[in-house]
Image (cartoon, rainbow, N blue to C red):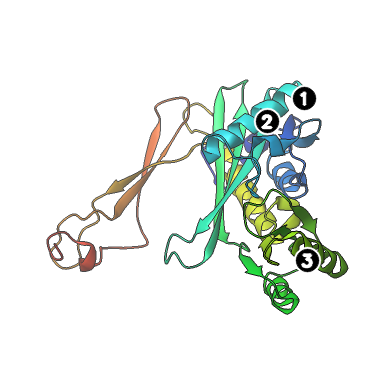
Amino acid sequence: MTSTARGDSDHVAVYAGQRIALLTQHGKERVIAPVLALALGCRVERVAGYDTDLLGTFTRDIARAGTQLEAARKKARIGMELAGLPLGLASEGSFGPDPFTGMFPWNLELLVWIDDERELEVVGVAQGKATFSHLLTADWAGAESFARQSGFPEHHLVLRPDGENDPRIRKGIAAWAELEAAFVWARDQSVRGLVFLETDVRANANPMRMENIRLAAEDLAKKLCALCPACGTPGFSLVERVAGLACADCGAPTRETRAEVDGCLKCAHRVVRERTDAGSADPGRCDFCNP
């Protein structure tokens, strides 16, 4: 964990023994609770009694309102209210093309921590490759091949007749016999004899996504363990990147990051960290050498 001017025992003591509300119906507590218990000494408690699918589903039958962060924040607030606790957290995921080539499915996970006693919000982040794909077919052999490529049955599947927006749906398919029966059902329901298959990306149905949620919990724990050297507030972490890394050829400042700034969420304390992993910028990134 990130060290500060205060000792590691102080890191844990901030939230040691505290109860943390986690609203989830997809088993996320299995990967979040152990990480935060080890790092902070807190007790993450799963909150039930609310259908989180009402806030949006990946299968598009209910649209998510607002941004990914807003959805996570709302979910955390609902959990805190139901549990009657001032501390809560919630996760929210999104899927799309990878940010590098745009060719591969990508998963971004946010884990929001809300501390009403200190008036803090800290966000853990993780991202990586995802199991997220689909197929429209009339052929069982094609469906079977798609399932194997998708990591089935460890990664569950969702089936519909005809296409991706058909309201008739079967979710959480996790066994071969179940998959074949759902395929026959969907093909019989279809006016064109076609079946739409897609990976189920709910956390409990998608091990690759669950691993990204665990990594987001580790990122969150690291931030919460970093106390402000000036006032002791948790969450002392990156708040700004400073451009200006010198070009290796002409020495002019570029738009590449020269330094990173860690800051407190409560007071004005800042610490500038100059980059040590790169002495100069590639001339291809220089506006003078490569206008």
> In the rendered image, which residue does mark 2 sit on?
88
The relative height of residue 206 versus residue 271 in the rendered view (above or below) is below
> In the rendered image, which residue does mark 3 sit on?
183
Is 211 left, or right, of 188 in this rendering? left
Callout 2 amino acid: Gly
Element class at badge 2 = strand
Instruction: Please name the residue shown 70% across and 57% down the image.
Output: 200
Is 174 left, or right, of 237 in this rendering? right
- Label 3, residues with CA under 10 Å away: few <14, some 14-19, many ≥20: many
Nearer the observer, 26 or 191 = 191
The Cα–Cα distance between marks 3 and 1, rounded to whole angstroms, is 41 Å
Q: Which quarter of the figure has residue 38?
A: top right
- Label 2, residues with CA under 10 Å away: few <14, some 14-19, many ≥20: many
Q: Tell us which disc is closer to us: 3 or 1.
A: 3
Callout 1 amino acid: Ala
Element class at badge 3 = helix
